[in-house]
Amino acid sequence: MLYIKNGLCIDPKTGMRKICDILTEGDRILKMGVNLEETEEFGKLPRHEIQTIDAEGYIVAPGLVDVHVHFRDPGFTKKEDILTGAASAAAGGFTSVVMMANTKPAADNADTIHYMLEKGKDTLIRVYACGAVTRNLEGKELTDMETLREAGAIGFTDDGKPLMDESLVIQAMEKCKKLGVPVSFHEEDPAFIQESGVNAGETAKAMGLSGADRQAEISLIERDIKLALQTGACVNIQHISTKEGVELVRRAKAEGADIHAEATPHHFTLTEKAVEKYGTLAKMNPPLRTEEDRAAIIEGLQDGTIDLIATDHAPHTKEEKAKPFTEAPSGIIGLETALALGITELVEKKKLTMEELLSKMAWNPARLYGIDAGYLAEGGPADMVIFDADCNQTFWKFLSKASNTPFAGRTCRSEIEYTICAGRVAYIKNMSMSALDD
């Protein structure tokens, strides 16, 4: 049993914000209230079985939920694996993550889904997986979505590979609607991309490149909104990067489409100018764009157009990122920096309240995928993050195998003290994960 006392408990589901205690039993929250240890009920509990955490001065929130991570397992475990990815997630306050399907072999078959989920059970957090929309992510033939759903896939995506065959997109949406799960799309039409990873703008020109035009994203979001309205499917627009894309989603929601959109911390924090400073460490798909786009993403977060914050955690080796810009892979790690960037860029700058930030990092993503997570309540999951929102930290070391991020060396507001999943401590500040396993 865990007894967490004196923390400022914030529940984004109900809007609760108060100093209270939380008592867990097994993997659930048994009791919430003020001064629980003074109650008769608490006095009857076996005290030697209770681990006490004094959270005075800290925020206690539901464990964060990231619906967009790449753990590179199976197939690319030199970059990351499910165990190290989960450790990185716990260090960032995440208790639930959804892995993408671009593994090797791709998650287009039941065996790969089973492997991913079974290995996930060996971690200290909750690990879920999406199935691939098309076989081998080739965009030519749909997978057996019913079988993948039975195997445990909680959604579908060919993330990283845009679906260009409109008829396949319609079929995928119809299948996902029937199965009651979301389908997520990486919206970049290769016809508008000369070199990936950098916006077609001033920075690309200075590098002697043409880059990725914003129309690559706009055109596919337009198409998929139209098809979402046509099919009634639940559609998630991944890592949105353009002001036009944000406006398209805003209009679609007003028209009644079951549309959702993710923003990454790097897209609401950085612009294309970061590529000049950080090189390949700021190379990602879709690319960082202009200050106008960054501001539109924040506005979309504010008005609810963008309902999710997801990291797109994408580990790569140092050797890969050391290649010339056009040869290096796109993507950065993000699990360990996400909450701090959200607090620094959004809460501290009064763009979002803490409750609104937690809604987009816990409750909303959990609801999208039907995960029992993202809230604090008696009888609810004992998944929590305890953090100090009134301190600074500088990011230097990561529990991920990778370190490919422009945020290394960046000082941000807040620091994770504990991550608790299913009533067990999954992370303690300054303690190695091996110590937790002992």
Image (cartoon, helix red, strand yellow):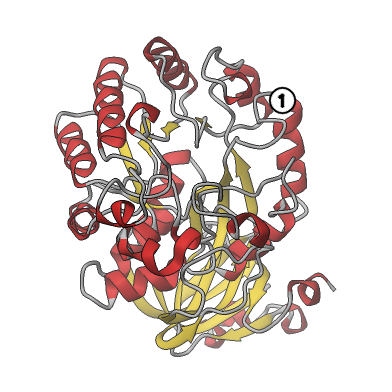
Q: Which residue was labeled with disc 1? A: 110
Q: Is residue 33 above or below residue 298?
A: below
Circle 1 — which element? helix
Can residue 13 be seen in this snapshot? no
Direction from residue 85 to residue 212 in the image, left or right: left
Q: Can you give x and y, in whole percent of width and height, for residue 399 in the image? A: 66, 69
Q: Position of residue 192 (x, y in %)?
A: 32, 31
- In the rendered image, residue 127, in percent from the top left (x then y), is placed at 64, 48
From the viewer's side, name the closer residue of 406 and 87: 406
Q: Is residue 321 left or right of residue 169?
A: right
Which residue occupies 31% across, 33% down? 216
Left or right: residue 83 versus residue 241 is right
View extreme (right): residue: 438
Which of 71/42 is in front?
71
Q: Quadrant of the C terminus?
A: bottom right
Question: In the image, what residue type sits under mark 1?
Answer: Ala
Q: Locate the N terminus and report the quarter of the image it occupies.
A: bottom right
Q: Is residue 11 left or right of residue 110?
A: left
**Is residue 228 positioned above or below 168 on the image?**
below
The one nearer the camera, 388 or 380, is 388
User: Closer to the camera, 33 or 153?
Assistant: 153
Rendered residue at 63%/52% (across/down):
126
